């Protein structure tokens, strides 16, 4: 099973760019890398997903090196409302896959004023 | 996301009792999932369903059962609740080719005494 390793916690300040790196040395060929955000007492919310190189959407960027053994979620110009737990997942929930998506303990990001 | 609702939101029950958690969605998604989350940890998949007639066990299905009554409804049952099933339970939905992108409900906090 592909496992992920993330920092337990991080803090930063409003307006800064925040990068959270995730290690996944045993990532399989068919695995995607997916990031979720979770606020207290709420369900997780999908942020971004990628397979290789760089993916960008309206809220974040995801950088994946060629060996795919790690990935970095980049949050531009964070605000206090970005304080949350961020989960890095690897796996593939597709119907023809092994259907494994491993959730680690996540990174608790605290944004300070 | 209000498109995925869970009832009840909170429940306290006693050891040995049968309990049902319900999930409904108005998103029209074909895939539905049940997860549990223990304090400070990531999510673990209990059961998942690709459509009404396709139900599969996840990584921690022992002690749980599910019913997909319709495309929009997916219920989770604990036949005989035990204290270590005390957790936060999330229902999620998905659709399309992005299998790792899921939409989560608000969660049910279950306490088994």
Image (cartoon, rainbow, N blue to C red):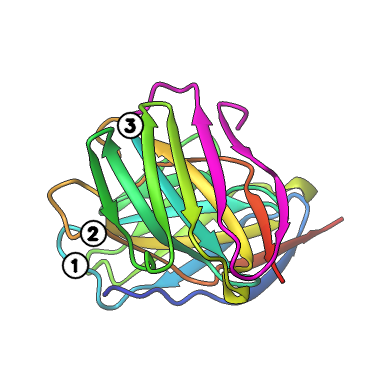
Residue B84 placement (x, y as % from top left) = 58, 76
Disc 2 designates what residue? A31
- Within 10 Å of the Cα at label 3, are there few (<14), some (14-19), or many (20+) other Cα atoms? some
Residue stretch rendered in magenta on the structure: B1-29
Are circles 2 and 3 on residues that touch, CB within 8 Å?
A: no
On residue A28, the disc is 1
Residue A32 placement (x, y as % from top left) = 28, 55
Residue at mark 1: chain? A
Residue B29 placement (x, y as % from top left) = 37, 27
Are circles 2 and 1 on residues that touch, CB within 8 Å?
A: yes
The vertical placement of B108 against B44, above or below, is: above
Q: CA distance from mark 1 to mark 3?
A: 23 Å
Residue at mark 3: chain? B
- Tell me the element at label 1: loop
Image depth: mark 1 or mark 3 in front: 3
The vertical placement of B59 against B102, above or below, is: below
- Tell me the element at label 2: loop
- Of B27 and B22, nearer the camera is B22
The image quarter containing residue A84 is bottom right
The image quarter containing residue A26 is bottom left
Image quarter (top left, top right, bottom left or bottom right) of the N terminus of chain A: bottom left
On residue B51, the disc is none
Residue at mark 2: chain? A
Identify the residue at horizontal 40%, vertical 73% (top origin). Answer: A4
In this rendering, does residue B99 appear at all? Answer: no
The vertical placement of B54 against B2, above or below, is: below
Identify the residue at horizontal 63%, vertical 68% (top origin). Answer: B86
- Of A83 and B28, nearer the camera is B28
Residue B28 lies in magenta, yes or no?
A: yes
On residue B95, the disc is 3
- Of B26 and A61, nearer the camera is B26
């Amino acid at each position: 099973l592909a496992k992920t390793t993330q920092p337990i916690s991080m803090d930063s300040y409003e307006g800064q760019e925040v990068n959270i790196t995730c290690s996944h040395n045993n990532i399989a060929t068919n695995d995607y890398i997916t990031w979720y955000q979770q606020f207290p007492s709420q369900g997780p919310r999908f942020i971004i997903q990628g397979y290789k190189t760089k993916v960008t959407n309206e809220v974040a960027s995801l950088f994946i090196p060629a060996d795919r053994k790690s990935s970095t979620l980049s949050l531009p110009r964070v605000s206090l409302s970005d304080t949350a737990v961020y989960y890095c997942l690897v796996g593939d929930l597709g119907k023809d896959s092994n259907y494994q998506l491993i959730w680690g303990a996540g990174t608790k990001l605290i944004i300070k004023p | 996301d209000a498109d995925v609702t869970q009832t009840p939101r909170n429940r306290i029950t006693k050891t040995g009792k049968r309990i049902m958690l319900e999930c409904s969605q108005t998103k029209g998604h074909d895939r539905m999932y049940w997860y549990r989350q223990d304090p400070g940890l990531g999510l673990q998949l209990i059961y998942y369903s690709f459509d009404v007639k396709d139900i599969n066990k996840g990584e921690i299905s022992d002690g749980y059962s599910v019913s997909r009554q319709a495309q929009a409804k997916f219920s989770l049952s604990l036949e005989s609740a035990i204290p270590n099933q005390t957790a936060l339970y999330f229902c999620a939905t998905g659709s399309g080719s992005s299998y790792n992108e899921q939409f989560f409900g608000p969660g049910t906090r279950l306490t088994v005494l």
